[in-house]
Amino acid sequence: MSGSVTARGRRLAIIFLAASTFTLTPASAQLAGFSSRVSLENNLAQTPPMGWNSWYHFAWTINESIIREQADAMASNGMMEAGYQYINIDDCWQGKRDAKGNIQSDPQTFPSGIKALADYVHSKGLKLGLYTDAGRVTCEGRPGSGGHVEQDAQTYAQWGVDYLKEDWCHTSGLNPKVAYREMGAALINTGRPIVFSLCDWGVESPWLWGAATGANLWRTTGDTSNKFSKILAILHGQIKLAPYAGPSHWNDPDGLEVGNGMSQAEDRAQFSLWAILAAPLIAGNDLSNMSQETLETLTAPEVIAVDQDPAGIEGTKVQEKGQLEVWSRPLQGKNARAVVILNRGLRYGVIAVNWRDLGLAPGAAAVRDLWEQKDLGSYENSIDVGVDSYSALMIKVVEN
Ligand code: GLA
């Protein structure tokens, strides 16, 4: 039997309980020298982090009211129930250091300080993320953590920060494995559970050594943009990275451009593919001002369930025909696969998705459309799928 499926989604809230037990490594108090034998495992991010980041939409124009508005939106529009947790402030929150070298927020744009903002975000049931840079100066010219690693980590913990992204601008002469491990150790030393997000843009293959620095995720690419061609370029850079991801240690192909100007089909394609990649789902749009369609994309429950699958196995490309690609990810439990069929071409196309290419046994398997949330029936050995230009469909295939 063969058939075709079409993509359309609908909103439904679902709660995911991320199992994150925080344990301090006994040896973590003696981290001077940062011996690579000391485990910096924090056990956070058992599934890929879900949240929002200020950079993609607001860049350097952020202030504390914008951050509060994003938290208000996430807490009230269904995103929190769908699993989103982190409100991450990117570059440009920093002011000057005080006389003792303590980092402070920008007095013009964040006059109430980060502690007050963290308290506010926590009062909504959400968590706060912050940004720094391994150099002395960030990409936007604000103070970085270079020379102040231990001191800054303590400050973040005192403020109640739950997530730290550390960038890599202005780091000439620094070894990323050493610099990131220094921050990873400093964060563990605070005793506060802080997700650690490493951002060297994939330059030094951080998937090979990121986990040893204490990082829970590492950027695998340069910066994203709201162009579908960029999303595809990033996607194609991920093909060989699947073996390096797993619970608490994720490849980070950068955030979501959903709601930032691509078409709805392109937004859904990115969201579907990022779920196959077990990527962090970090929204990058203005949450306080988005369309219903954008919200439905960001909260699609069965797509999010794939991203957050507890087995934490990242998917990859398994088949290609002309402009059509099939990406697949094994899911926990039964012989089940999440599958995205991507059309990166200019014309509608049809491709047969074979169970063999998914690593499933020949014979009957049940197929479900994850955007429509609809069972499509049982298919023998394969299903023919038709996909519009610059779109993707997402199905789940389970051996009978
Ligand atoms: C770099 C990072 C981005 C963002 C900016 C902020 O370009 O890759 O994600 O954090 O810096 O300056």
Image: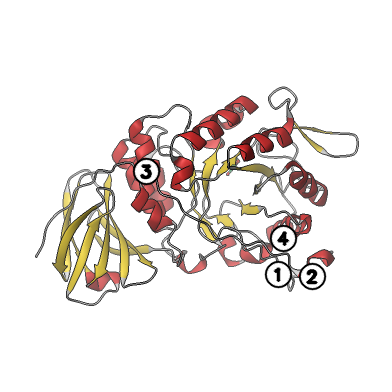
In screen coordinates, is 108 left or right of 341? Answer: right
- Ligand 1's quadrant: top right
Q: Which residue is mark 3?
A: 229
Residue count near mark 2 (Cα–Cα under 10 Å), binned few <14, some 14–19, many ≥20? few
Q: Secondary structure at mark 3?
A: helix
In terms of image quadrants, where is residue 332?
Answer: bottom left
Furthest residue toward top: 108
Q: Which residue is mark 4?
A: 181
- Which x, y percent locates residue 218? 57, 56
- Marks 2/3: CA–CA distance: 46 Å
Q: Residue at x 38, y 47 (%)?
A: 271
Amino acid identity at mark 2: Ala
The numbered mark at residue 27 is 2
Q: Residue at x 65, y 39 (%)?
A: 139
Q: Quadrant of the C terminus?
A: bottom left
Which sits earlier in the primary sequence, circle 4 or circle 1? 1
In screen coordinates, is 126 left or right of 282? Answer: right
- Which x, y percent locates residue 6? 19, 48
**Number of the front mark, 1 or 3:** 1
Dot 3 beta carbon under 8 Å from ligand 1: no
Amino acid identity at mark 1: Ser
Q: Which residue is mark 1?
A: 39
- Which x, y percent locates residue 232? 37, 49
- Marks 1/2: CA–CA distance: 8 Å
The numbered mark at residue 102 is none
Which sits earlier in the primary sequence, circle 2 or circle 3? 2
